Amino acid sequence: MKNMKNKIIAELAQGFEGDLVKAKLLVNAAACSGADIAKLQLVYADELATPDYLHYKLFKSLEMPDNSWKELLDYSKELNIELNFDVFGTKSLNLCQELGIKGIKLHGTDMTNIGLLNEVSESNIKNIYLGAGGSNLTEIELAISILKNKNIILLLGFQSYPTPNNDNQISRVSYLNDYLLKKYNNIEIGFADHPDPNSSLGFALAATAVGAGATIIEKHLTLGKIMKMEDHESALNPDEFLDFTKTIRDCFLALGNTVLSDDFGMSNSEKSYRKMIRRHVTSSKDLKKGTVLSSEDLVLKRTASENLIYDISLVYDKILTVDLEKNKAINHNILK
């Protein structure tokens, strides 16, 4: 699959409240805060709910004309930030295709929506985020099988306004990394972060998910928590989000990329550390030229000398070709 690794999504969700000006302000905040992708919910109420549903009026209030979404996309390009959308049906999916959107998210509500999954599979959009909160493994694998020709980013985590710490189940990230990545070559595992933004988990939860193997982190962003815009409950203010992106990028960097080799692909700084701490073969006493070296002549110590010998057994029974004072490093140049 195309490498989507190590991305941070600013989840703007419903925070724009159906207002293009607010939507632009949020996209600008995402760009200025270091996000790779800004994502909003492209909602047409009648694709998602019946008029008697509790939040139908809210969904209706989020609707914007198609040209407003086009204007928002053009604005995101000016800011050099990718714009993605949640889609909930044929109309929103078709608009994303017309706009040339690179990635869309299917909310957990559509994990078992076979009709929509098939439409997405036949669409021209390659990157598909699957919201997996509340889904079981059978449902997830069915969706994956339908979207087998797409780049799939499985987003674990769910919104509980905010989500209690013990409900986050970060271990599921590592479990599904082990299980799914062995079976499919078009999957990455991400984490949608929904802690109380004022708690110690505001940054720590996403960092833990990175350590467990999440390569994509989604985090809610709002213009100001004090404004109490839609979906503010687990959101960060722009200045906080900037600190968040810096922290998570540092976590991605610290995670590294272990190589299947004897030294694990050790960095130059670690190699320098190794060289500094290793004990090397040195003389335990003054030694004369011609000495046949034995264990009583040798000791392992740290030394500043170059071309050193780490394994003392390699020196046993070798003949010293020079006089050597106590505490001097021994190397192959003075042995025969």
Image (spheres, rainbow, N blue to C red):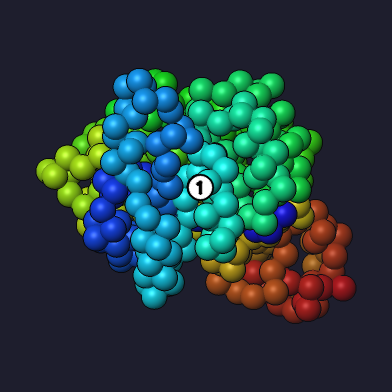
Residue type indicated by callout 1: Ser
Q: Position of residue 242 (x, y in %)?
A: 30, 58
Which one is nearer the viewer's eye here, 189 or 43? 43
Q: Quadrant of residue 101?
A: bottom right
Residue drawn at 59 percent across, 68 percent down? 268
Q: In this figure, which residue is indicated by the disc labeled 1?
A: 92
* Residue displayed at 53% across by 63% down: 99
Asked whether residue 74 is in view, the answer is yes
Whether 331 is drawn above or below 55: the answer is below
Q: Position of residue 11 (x, y in %)?
A: 38, 47
Question: In screen coordinates, is 16 left or right of 326?
Answer: left
**Does residue 84 appear to the left or right of 241 in the view shown?**
right
Work out which residue is located at the far left of the displayed protein and give it. 226
Depth check: give the residue in front, 118 or 8. 118
Above or below 250: residue 203: above
Q: Is residue 266 left or right of residue 35?
A: right
Q: Residue at x 36, y 61 (%)?
A: 68
Q: Quadrant of the C terminus?
A: bottom right
Residue 317 % position (x, y): 86, 60
Q: Position of residue 304 (x, y in %)?
A: 55, 72
The N terminus lies in quadrant: bottom right
Tell me the element at label 1: helix
Q: How many marks?
A: 1
Depicted 144 relative to depicted 263: above or below? above
Disc 1 residue crowd, few under 14, some 14–19, many 20+, Cα 10 Å: some
